[in-house]
Image: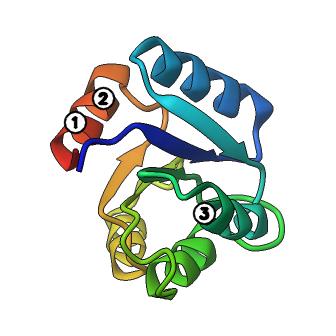
């Protein structure tokens, strides 16, 4: 299934803007969420083809949101790529165990991100 709509989840307005600019320039439709709780709601209402999930956010973190989305029957088919500053191997393993399909460390290389999105599509 080709990826057309991407949900960008990050509490940083700068990160959301940068990812939105990059993705829209490549032809993707982008919707955003500012928190883990918001990501869960928007994943159900927007039905994105992919979610880019930050980890470090106030309230529900990205690991918790990824676990909730990946285990909910309504949203479990949506692939999630974690995009986070948490770069330890244990962080990556934990993210994948929560249901993430891929894990990128910030600052995200734009070409690498697009290649991984295309690989999922």
Question: Which residue matches tag 2?
Answer: 114
Labels 3, 2: front one: 3
Question: Which residue matches tag 3?
Answer: 43
The answer to whether marks 1 and 2 mark residues whose Cβ atoms lie closer than 8 Å is yes
Instruction: Identify the image quadrant of the C terminus.
Output: top left
Labels 1, 2: front one: 1
In primary-sequence order, the first of circles 3 and 1 is 3
Tell me the element at label 2. helix
Question: Which residue matches tag 1?
Answer: 118
Nearer the observer, 78 or 105: 78
34 sits left or right of 81 in the view: right
Residue 49 position within the rendered picture, expressed as x and y whole percent measured from the top left: 41, 51
Q: Real-space Cα distance between discs 3 and 2?
A: 21 Å
Residue drawn at the location 49% of the way across and 53% of the way down? 51
Residue drawn at the location 24% of the way across and 40% of the way down? 116
Determine the image quadrant of residue 76: bottom left
In primary-sequence order, the first of circles 3 and 2 is 3
* Label 3: few (<14), some (14–19) or many (≥20) C-alpha neighbours in 10 Å: many
Determine the image quadrant of residue 90: bottom left
Nearer the observer, 105 or 79: 79
Residue drawn at the location 67% of the way across and 70% of the way down? 40
- The single residue placed furthest to the top in the displayed view is 25
Residue 6 position within the rendered picture, expressed as x and y whole percent measured from the top left: 50, 42
Q: Real-space Cα distance between discs 1 and 2?
A: 6 Å
């Amino acid at each position: 299934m080709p990826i057309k709509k991407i949900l960008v989840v990050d509490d940083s307005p700068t990160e959301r803007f940068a990812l939105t600019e990059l993705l829209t320039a490549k032809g993707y439709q982008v919707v955003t969420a500012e928190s883990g709780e918001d990501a869960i709601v928007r994943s159900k209402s927007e039905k994105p083809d992919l979610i880019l999930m930050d980890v470090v956010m106030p309230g529900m973190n990205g690991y918790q949101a990824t676990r909730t989305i990946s285990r909910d029957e309504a949203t479990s088919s949506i692939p999630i790529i974690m995009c986070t500053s948490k770069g330890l191997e244990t962080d990556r393993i934990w993210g994948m165990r929560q249901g993430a399909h891929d894990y990128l460390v910030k600052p995200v290389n734009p070409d690498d991100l697009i290649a991984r999105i295309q690989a999922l599509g």
